[in-house]
Amino acid sequence: MIRVVDVHKSFGGQQVLKGVNLDFTTGKITTIVGTSGCGKTVLLKHLNALLLPDRGEVLVDNVDITKLKQKELYAMRGRFGVLFQGAALLDSMTIFDNVAFPLREKTKMDEAQIRKKVEERLDQVGLEGMGYKYPAELSGGMKKRAGLARALIMDPEIVLFDEPTTGLDPVLATGIHQLIARTQATFGFTGVVVSHTIPQVFEISDYVAILAGGIIEEIKPTKEFKESKNPVVQQFIRGEIEGPIRVL
Amino acid sequence: MLSLLTHIGRFTLRQLSEMGRMSLFLLSALMLAFRPPAKIYLIIHHIKTIGVDSLSVVILSGFFTGMVMGFQGYYSLRKFNAESWLGSAAALGLLRELGPVLSAFMVTGRTGSAMAAELGTMRATEQIDALYSMAINPIKYLVSPRIIAGLIAMPMLTAIFDVVGIYGAYLVGVGLLGVSSGSYFSGMESSVVFNDVYSGFMKSLSFGLIITWVCCYKGFYAPPRATGVSQATTESVVLSFVLILVWDYFLTSVML
């Protein structure tokens, strides 16, 4: 169970998170939606301590990860997989080496075992036979799939998805969403998705939370969220300019 | 007046904080370099990037520096009828000063800037965050091997610069200006002592550390945007040049 308690974060003079409280249910996909620049990625990066809060706690199985020593923190991060917005593949390596990288660095598996596991993951994300290519040779969608293969290679308990479909066409976006849902069903990880691709992202989400004005305005199971009477939720879902969310 | 003092105070605090951060960065990189598992394959890769890839520019600059020293040395020494000391003057100048400093400049321009740009791009494209999220320490993976490689490659490049420079001065002095080959080498043999070579070696070693440290630091903490990368690259080159010259002065005054 991941629990975010009263998290505040500022950059310079700008306060981005103003007391976020949020629980993520184990084994389910929770999606955080919100307008561009509202702090979704900042919140996501607090979950595995890539960013530390100015105030507040991030609890993973009741352990506050913001207070862990470096060695414990690295062990905790080993439980996470992350798919970054731009996939963040190491561009000096081939796709195969990118996916194999955590296994080579963090396990004692031999090369034959690594090859077997990497090829299995590449097959699962539809990149069979593409391992020899470099990230620069792949399309945006293929990079995301390679990033997903890398995020899943260590069989993580928790996977964070930062805008997994941004910059992709609707067909490819649906493909990536289905891939996330399929891999979640296969591996049973706890998924946290940051996205503003609605309503498509609702199809893969068990819970949806909306971040607005630096706080979680509402979190509900997807069906209830869609029917919420909260004016912030309604404005966001309908994409209206007028409403409690200040757009311009 | 108060506003001016506030500005000076803020500037000083900012600089001190930056120096502290840079020192901690170096300390952390050096400590991690000796913590197993050793990244030998990465060190070898970076020795190739810093050393082998800079070889042509170091040889070229060393050769022309030596030839210029041949002309200038001959011009100065002739005024005292001491042309036969050309070999000695060229060797001492190159071994003690020009070899370490100029080869460090060449490596900064050729490899240091590329290092800062590469790490800056990795920061901007979240590759450094990706390493953190895979529970891999990016300082151990990206910085420590570069610093160790710099410490190994820089003295070797300087040695090559020195040898090529001495040969360049020989070509001009002996080949063009008529200095005797015997006096060129005997002057060099009689005046160059171990301390001259040692002084040059220590300088090149410390310059290797300065270049990799500054360039890695600037790239690693580059602001995550396109202008951030160019800013980091420029700052890394300028700061490396300045630190090389300042450190050169201190080492010279200590080791003279």
Image: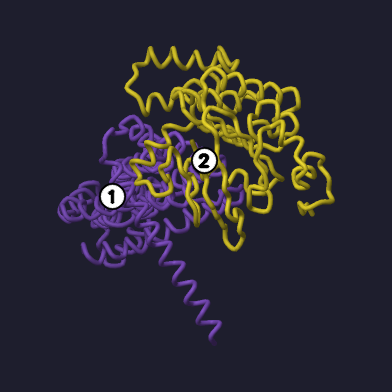
Chain colours: A yellow, B purple
- Write down the residue under mark 1: B205
Residue B159: in sight, yes or no? no
Image quarter of residue A110? top left
> How far across and how far down the image is residue A27, in percent?
53, 27
- Is A164 rendered above or below residue B224? above
The residue that appears at 32% across and 22% down in the rendered structure is A108
The residue that appears at 29% across and 41% down in the rendered structure is B33
> How far across and how far down the image is residue B139, in percent?
39, 43
Q: Nearer the viewer, residue B131 or A214?
A: A214
- Is A110 rendered above or below residue B86? above
* Left or right position of B203 against A99: left
The residue that appears at 75% across and 43% down in the rendered structure is A233
Chain under numbered label 1: B
**Which element is circle 1 on?**
helix
* Left or right position of A38 against B130: right
What amino acid is labelled 2 in the image?
Met
> How far across and how far down the image is residue B22, in percent?
39, 57
Q: Determine which of the numbered discs, if any, sits on residue B122 in the image.
A: 2
Chain under numbered label 2: B
Q: Nearer the viewer, residue A141 or A171?
A: A171
- Is A125 rendered above or below residue B120? above
Instruction: Count the marks.
Output: 2
* Left or right position of B126 against A237: left
* Left or right position of B52 against A197: left
What amino acid is labelled 1 in the image?
Leu
> How far across and how far down the image is residue B143, in percent?
38, 43
Q: Residues within 10 Å of mark 2 (few under 14, many from 20)?
A: many
**Which element is circle 2 on?**
helix
Which comes sooner in the sequence, label 2 or label 1? 2
Q: Label 2 vs label 1: CA separation?
A: 27 Å
Image quarter of residue B92? bottom left
